[in-house]
Amino acid sequence: MTADATRQNGQDTPYDLLGIGFGPSNLALAIALDEHNSGAAPNERITTRFLERQPRFGWHRGLLIDDATMQVSFPKDLVTMRDPTSDFSFLCYLKEKNRLVDFLNQKTLFPLRAEFHDYFEWAAGRVGQLVEYAAEAVAVEPVEEAGEIRWFDVVTESPTGERVRRRARNLSVAVGLRPHLPPGTVLSDRVWHSSQLVPRVAERLAGGGPVRRVLVVGAGQSAAETVAYLHRNFADAEVCAVFAKYGYTPADDSPFANRIFDPEAVDVYYGAPPEVKRSLLDYHRGTNYSVVDTELIESLYATMYREGFHGRRRLRMLNVSRVHSVHEHAGGLDVTVEDLPTGQRETLAADLVVHATGYRSHDLGSLLGDAAKLCVRDEEDALLVRRDHSVCLASQVSAGIYLQGGTEHSHGLSSTLLSTVAVRAGEIRDSLLTRCSTVTAS
């Protein structure tokens, strides 16, 4: 459909806020705004709409392994760190689902990942009137009046190709992360990214042919979980983990290290000079990047040891190695693995390769289009972002853009994690209230 065929959504006045993406971050913001609006006078309410390209709420569905648990404690839900009295908390969800007592009897702070996803869906359903699904943002256009850019038009496209234009004074961009793949990787029925692990395995088990050998590339939590999941589901297959390290690195989840995810740590990081920010990221990468829960490491080692004793090894660790090339043919894959210390290469016949190689932030320029040219950048070409999570924009712009994610350089390690979503939602809500009151007063 051409731009001329784009339909206006018929709103009388611009929204105070349009949210692009509806994962946990914008869901937390929707709740914060809904709670504010429910107790506010009509002229003090924030008009808002959230736009999500998926047909329904979904958060890393492809990694909802049946026994995988969260790596953050349940009080770091959508609301509790902002307002422990909110009835959108995980505990209120459990109470409504009649599972509160059973959950408490487990004596754990870490729910099943699938259960936390169900909690997100429950919360999203309660604010469903604020969300439009199957509406992918394909363009963001600045709107100028009298030399001032006061609004942004967001154009969305439905699965049928229909385009709709909506206008807002502010945007909240929370589009999450995109799967990262090594250069030259081509995904196929035999070459996957771990983000699609669970449905892909189900398809294969339902009649996709035998699996005799599968290689998993990566050394982080998702890689180790993928290895364990494939080993359990393909009972006759050899599962080979390929990574450049000598062994999996345990995650540093000690109490003092975890303070890097405290809300107060965002203030410390934000106000620190660039060299201190770099050192903090380097010091604490072991809390989040390319690390694995100790319990899972020990479980994998025990499996490998047990198989060695019984003389039937199905779990192999190809450490200090990398995948040199993957050749796909009618019968499967020929995967050449290079031993890094010696340079020697071995070609393995395989049925599957799974890249558990993590995620990267989306390119804001491609998403925002012309609006991205209005964003101010520093000498290292990073976006300048204020403490309230709003992007510094050119002087002629009075509209606002808030970022939820993609601000690790300015706000620290918790930028892309769940730890501070509730607090951040409250900060953005308060900033919006100030902005909107200023607009009303003028």
Image (cartoon, rainbow, N blue to C red):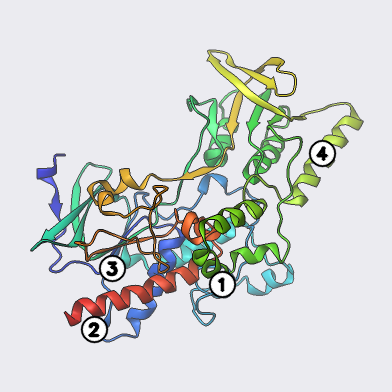
Could you tell me how far apart the alpha carbons at marks 3 and 2 are, in whole angstroms?
A: 13 Å
Using a 10 Å C-alpha cutoff, classify the residue at mark 3 as few (fewer than 14 neighbours), some (14 to 19) or many (20 or more).
Answer: some
Mark number, residue 48: 3
Could you tell me how far apart the alpha carbons at marks 4 and 2 are, in whole angstroms?
A: 61 Å
Q: Is label 1 in a helix, a strand or a loop?
A: helix
Q: Is label 2 in a helix, a strand or a loop?
A: helix
Using a 10 Å C-alpha cutoff, classify the residue at mark 1 as few (fewer than 14 neighbours), some (14 to 19) or many (20 or more).
Answer: few
Q: Which residue is under mark 2?
A: 42
Could you tell me how far apart the alpha carbons at marks 3 and 4 are, in whole angstroms?
A: 51 Å
Using a 10 Å C-alpha cutoff, classify the residue at mark 4 as few (fewer than 14 neighbours), some (14 to 19) or many (20 or more).
Answer: some
Q: Disc 4 or 1, which lies upstream in sequence?
A: 1
Residue 341: x and y in percent read 74, 23
Mark number, residue 303: 4
Which residue appears at 53% of the width and 30% of the height?
182
Report if residue 332 is visible in the image.
yes
Q: Are the residues flagged by discs 3 and 4 in contact, CB closer than 8 Å?
A: no
Q: Disc 3 or 1, which lies upstream in sequence?
A: 3
Q: Nearer the viewer, mark 2 or mark 1?
A: 1
Residue 290 shown left or right of residue 78 in the figure = right
